[in-house]
């Protein structure tokens, strides 16, 4: 039986990952701060520590070893540096969640090598004020340059699903239903997404069924323009969207990118993973969210 540690597995696709691992017969240990209840009961083992406290993290891990560690909540170089130290000799394979945000916007599908974090300068200054994108580049750079164990970093696009606590898709569906303005500056921009369950399945595959290392792009097959997304919401809700290019900040779409932002997943495909079609699940999810917004669920 494989022995896996999940750091941060009580929210969104982290929960899906834990459930998927358990369904596959994997022994799962959760490391959290112990502040969020979960539904796993005695099916998982539990460690309690704040991952930003290296001494608490080291004490929690102790002499334990894991076949795979999934790290869903690493955002800074310092956290990655500490993980490289704490898990040295304690892990066979390390999977860290990264992001499409490491890339700049562009019309062409982005390849992993276009952001080379194997040679990216590391800023280990804990006082440095870095945005989310640079924080993720730093995390990748540290793991790829300093870890003495195999590491893969999953570059996810925006993850969608019924349990998305940020409610980014809910924002659009609800505002269309209520005839409220949505601010989008470029309706021609193309986007990729991935469903929370597919994200979990990919993480499982990457950690336990593949030997891939380095950065790996992951998203559902297919892309959609923001105009097509709004049209799909109109079709599923039966309501007409009000879209403007300039609005108040509170009305601006969380998908409001200035140009296309899409990834190439050839690396994962060549290694054997098959992604779902975006068109298979996005209309279903929109319909479900529309029902929730109406109070039907």
Image (cartoon, helix red, strand yellow):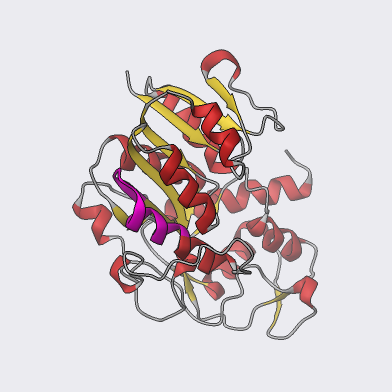
- Tell me, yes or no, whether the highlighted magenta stretch contains residue 164: no
Residue 132, picture quadrant: bottom right
Q: The C terminus appears in which quarter of the rendering?
A: top right
Q: Residue at x 56, y 31 (%)?
A: 31
Q: Which residue lies furthest to the bottom in this view?
A: 246
Asked whether, in this view, residue 67 is left or right of residue 42, the answer is left
Q: Residue at x 63, y 48 (%)?
A: 164
* Placement of 145 over or under 182, stated as above or below: above
- Tell me, yes or no, whether the highlighted magenta stretch contains residue 145: yes
Q: Which residue lies furthest to the top in this view?
A: 42
Residue 165, horizontal then vertical, whole percent: 67, 48
| Residue extent of the magenta highlight | 139-152
Residue 70, picture quadrant: top left
Q: Residue furthest left?
A: 270
Q: Is residue 181 visible?
A: no
* Placement of 119 over or under 81, stated as above or below: below
Residue 128, horizontal then vertical, whole percent: 61, 68
Q: Looking at the image, which is closer to me, 266 or 104?
A: 104
Q: Looking at the image, which is closer to me, 195 or 85?
A: 85
């Amino acid at each position: 039986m494989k022995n896996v540690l999940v750091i941060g597995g009580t929210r969104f696709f982290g929960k899906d990952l834990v459930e998927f691992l358990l369904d596959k017969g994997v022994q799962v240990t959760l490391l959290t701060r112990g502040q969020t209840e979960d539904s796993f009961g005695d099916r998982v083992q539990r460690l309690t520590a704040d991952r930003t406290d290296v001494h608490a993290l080291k004490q929690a891990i102790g002499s334990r070893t894991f076949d795979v560690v999934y790290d869903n909540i690493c955002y800074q170089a310092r956290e990655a540096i500490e993980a490289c130290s704490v898990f040295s000799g304690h892990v066979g394979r390390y999977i860290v969640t990264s992001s499409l945000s490491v890339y700049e916007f562009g019309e062409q599908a982005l390849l992993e090598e276009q952001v080379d974090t194997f040679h990216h300068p590391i800023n280990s200054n804990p006082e440095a004020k870095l945005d989310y994108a640079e924080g993720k580049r730093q995390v990748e750079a540290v793991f790829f340059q300093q870890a003495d164990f195999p590491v893969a970093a999953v570059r996810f696009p925006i993850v969608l699903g019924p349990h998305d606590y940020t409610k980014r898709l809910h924002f659009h569906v609800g505002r269309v239903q209520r005839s409220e303005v949505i601010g989008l500056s470029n309706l021609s921009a193309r986007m990729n997404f991935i469903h929370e369950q597919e994200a979990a399945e990919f993480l499982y595959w990457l950690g336990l069924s593949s030997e891939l290392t380095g950065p790996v792009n992951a998203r559902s097959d297919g892309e959609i323009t923001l105009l097509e997304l709004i049209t799909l919401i109109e079709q599923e809700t039966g309501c007409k969207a009000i879209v403007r290019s300039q609005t108040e900040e509170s009305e601006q779409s969380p998908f409001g990118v200035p140009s296309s932002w899409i990834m190439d997943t050839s690396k994962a495909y060549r290694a054997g993973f098959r992604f779902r079609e975006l068109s298979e699940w996005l209309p279903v999810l929109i319909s479900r969210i529309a029902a929730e917004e109406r109070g039907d669920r």
